[in-house]
Image: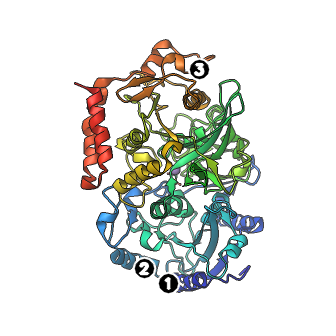
Amino acid sequence: MAYEAKNRKLKDWVDEVAELCQPDAIHWCDGSKAEYDRLMAQMVAGGAARPLEKRRNCFLFRSDPSDVARVEDRTYISTPSEDEVGPTNNWIDENELKQTMLGLYQGCMRGRTMYVIPFSMGPLSSPMAKIGVEITDSPYVVCNMQIMTRVGTKVVEVLGENGEFVPCLHSIGAPLEPGQEDVPWPCAPMEKKYIAHFPHENLIWSFGSGYGGNALLGKKCFALRIASTMARREGWMAEHMLILRLISPEGKRYHIAAAFPSACGKTNLAMVQPTIPGWKAECLGDDIAWMKIGPDGRLYAINPEAGFFGVAPGTSYQSNPMAMDTIRENTIFTNAALTDDGEIWWEGMGVPAPDHAIDWKGRDWAPGNDDPAAHANARFTAPAAQCPAISPDWEDPEGVPIDIFIFGGRRTGVVPLATEALDWDHGVFLGATASSETTAANIGAVGKLRRDPFAMQPFCGYDMADYFQHWLDMGDRLGDKAPRIFYVNWFRKTADGDWLWPGYGDNSRVLAWMCERIEGKAGATKTPIGNLPGESDLDLTGLDLAPENIRELLRVDAEAWRAEVPDIEQHFAQFGDRLPARLRGQLNQLEERLGE
Ligand code: SAT
Ligand code: MN
């Protein structure tokens, strides 16, 4: 043990877990570079990791082919009564799930080391920060947690003797019998994977997967699912949102928090490099925002994370130069392809495919091969501080005041480029009915349309209808200090399947319009679905965009919208009486505005 923890609850819990899981050894993580280097060296020696000759202190991991994304079907919110979790979560009775999982945890760390990772979500000095402790038998998880959260002895000091923490128990579920040889990516079969949350106890139990959101428990499990339940109880917000600062040519700062489903461009927008002259942007976070009302009545946001766990495919110097510079060193790559000269590669990296590579499954790969070289959900884990676009205020303990909320998703049709909500309730309606085509971030079908309210469908730890009410309540409390709400869709396509909008840096044109709306400087036209910019309201100078494209991007197709209504009705119907009447009212008003 590198240090002595004084916290009684922590010591008792570690003893209890050690007795249950029977590891060969226990290691208390101090979060140091030496610790990281030692674990990486061990994983390299054991064949789990591979150093990349072309990138300093970077490593490539290949997961088991079955363990490549979050597993929403195996994710549970467990409470005494089922109606607490609502129709969008999987529920198993607390006692039953605990019995099942205790059976699985029994002896599950035999032959392995158990790591105790004290971590903080949020800068340690922030009044909004919260402490967790993850126990895991995966050194890959330890190294990723070191990048994604603030790990180490300082956290243990803050915890003191009686401090509160969220216990996060994780096992890959692959004990080693004496003499048994390990595999590069040990994990349990799908039917034994459980990602379980017990919000009444602020407790997380994860079993069987080593991958991202299933295993790095500070992220989706704590900072979203458990934190959303805390936030509701305590009157704040835990949201699946990037945070960015936009600076106008006059030097005025605007803070934007935007919610999009996984793999819909949050990281790209978080690090946007504006193409409009004079505008600048700084990144504060790319995935999660914790927000509370400050003494001045405005809503303040912190990023609880310390790193980026971004989707690699599609990331290039064209789509996201800041991310490309962030991942030059000290980065973990998972399920990317490996070139013969020791460099990583993925589809959409913006450099020609190598003549030969080793694909994410470890097989020979060459251009023309039927399968992609990198998995569609291949990821990079990189320290936020390395991002050239990171805001100097990204670790401000008080957070930044939010001016603008954006919701959105991936829709090839119907939904226009940008819409401004008519008021807060209408904005909540836009968030509650957000829809997107599914991506490879979850195991399951890709490209299927689903409603993903506030991009929180997989991450809200309680009844989604009560969550809608929480949004309405927050709006009531914020009053005229509430952020303005917008809805965007960067993903429209022509009938031939070409993108209508260039996206990436040019998305700044839409962001600038939003800021100017706040100032009363930019125009908009009221339509049945909200206020839309006209062609002349957006700054499109220097953009080579066909006039018919821009018309299509800003067109409201009333008929197509009327066709959406039954789907929204069905979406709302699942919440029964719990759906706030104000949202039902919003739907009625939309129908009226759309007319016959
Ligand atoms: O694997 S994660 O859940 O962290 C990534 C995502 O789906 O957003
Ligand atoms: Mn996410």
Q: Which residue is mark 2?
A: 102
Residue at numbered disc 3? 539
| Image location (x, y in percent) of residue 48 | 62, 62
Residue 588: image quadrant is top left
Q: Secondary structure at mark 3?
A: loop
Q: Amino acid at mark 1?
A: Leu
Q: Secondary structure at mark 1?
A: helix
Task: Tally the numbered discs.
Answer: 3
**Viewer-nearest residue: 97 or 473:** 473
Residue 351 screen position, x and y as percent: 65, 33
Q: Are marks 2 and 1 in contact (CB under 8 Å)?
A: yes
Residue located 38% across and 51% down the image: 468
Q: Dividing the image into 4 quarters, which one contains the N terminus?
A: bottom right
Residue at x-position 54% and y-position 80%: 110
Which label belongs to residue 20? 1
* Of callouts 2 and 3, the N-terminal one: 2
